[in-house]
Amino acid sequence: MASEAERAPRQRVAVIGAGAIGGTMAALLQAAGHDVTVTARGANLEAMREHGLRLRGGFGTHTAAVTALERLEEVPDVAILAVKATGTADALEANRGQLADVPLLVAQNGLYGERTAGRLLGHERVAGALSLIAANSLEPGVVTVTAANPTIVGGAEGERFAALLGEVMPIERTADLEGSQWTKLLINMVNAIPAIVGHPVQDVIGDPGLRRVMVASMRECARVGLASGVRFQPMQRLSPLLVRLLAWAPHRVAQQVPLRIRARMGEVPNLGSTQQSIRRGQPTEVDMINGAVVEAAARAGREAPVNAALVELVHEVERSGRFLPASVVRQLA
């Protein structure tokens, strides 16, 4: 994090989507003295208007006095888009009038979110952020950080946002945003199975049968990326060499990847973003995560059957509102 001498001047920051990651960024930036406006809906909006945006956990405790709106009413100096990838088009359309030529950071899961946002807005002043922060946001207006990991920033406006966010949280720069997105996509293979069975990520990884399926989904992601010419970038001690080992090594070696991820999550149960969406009754990003592997596999003339099955099971849970027995997942590998 930046020292007092390195801190940027006070800025008007708009955070579109104050969930787990957007809420963390908004609260920390407000605590650092920036004028922060957030957009939200429903109970989350009302809670922040009444009680402020409450941050707990790994970055400390803070109640941020943010301006909470359904949509932006003024043009900010910079903006952060932190809605689910499925909500990008609607969020940008709702705030288009306030975002013309405004530097934008897209903090989302999935691939190429910054390209989509730039195309929809018609300008290229866009950066991408890959947050490795583990956080839960199940109570309206409250974000609990369970692991204060770094956020990786790259793209056309990367320097600007690295400086801004570097004031308040650990930031790493990447010169290869696509390669970093693929590594984050691989890490995000931890999300689908917890959302299907309704258990924390740590517990799922600790179950040998579920871990075997998770490794299979990661293996598909690694193989498809490599076949597509992706240059995976280092992230959370996941090196390009380890990605190749994950792709081709025996299970006893490959399983070290999710086990390392679990170790970095700490002891506080983490539900994963997909399960959090289900528990809030919101659409998940599974099509942008596991589904992205399936689509990339098709483009490369390959198949990703485990990820395809996980996508369908997550959608089944979304439709029914009921988690499934672990045995349903274990049989996939």
Image: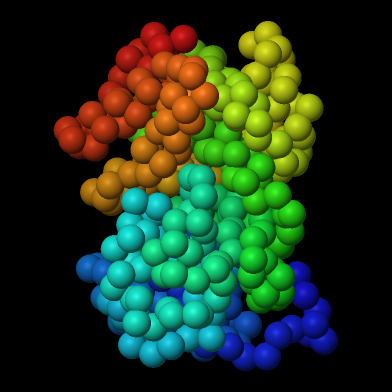
Residue 76, x across and y down, in percent: 48, 86
**176 is higher (above) or lower (below) than 101:** above
Residue 325, x across and y down, in percent: 31, 19
Question: For residue 254, which quarter of the picture?
Answer: top right
Please identify the quadrant where the N terminus is shown.
bottom right
For the point 39% across and 9% down, the residue is 331
**118 is higher (above) or lower (below) than 38:** above
**121 is higher (above) or lower (below) than 191:** below
For the point 55% across and 68% down, the residue is 124
Picture colour scheme: rainbow
* 315 to the left or right of 88: left
**187 is higher (above) or lower (below) than 56:** above
* 105 to the left or right of 263: left
Residue 195, x across and y down, in percent: 37, 35
For the point 50% across and 75% down, the residue is 79
Closest to the observer: 35 or 112?
112
| Count of numbered marks | 0
Closest to the observer: 47 or 72?
72
Determine the residue located farthest toward the left in the rendered image. 320
For the point 49% across and 80% down, the residue is 101
Q: Is residue 327 visible?
A: yes
Question: For residue 40, which quarter of the picture?
Answer: bottom left
* 74 to the left or right of 173: left
Residue 20, x across and y down, in percent: 46, 59
Q: Is residue 210 visible?
A: no
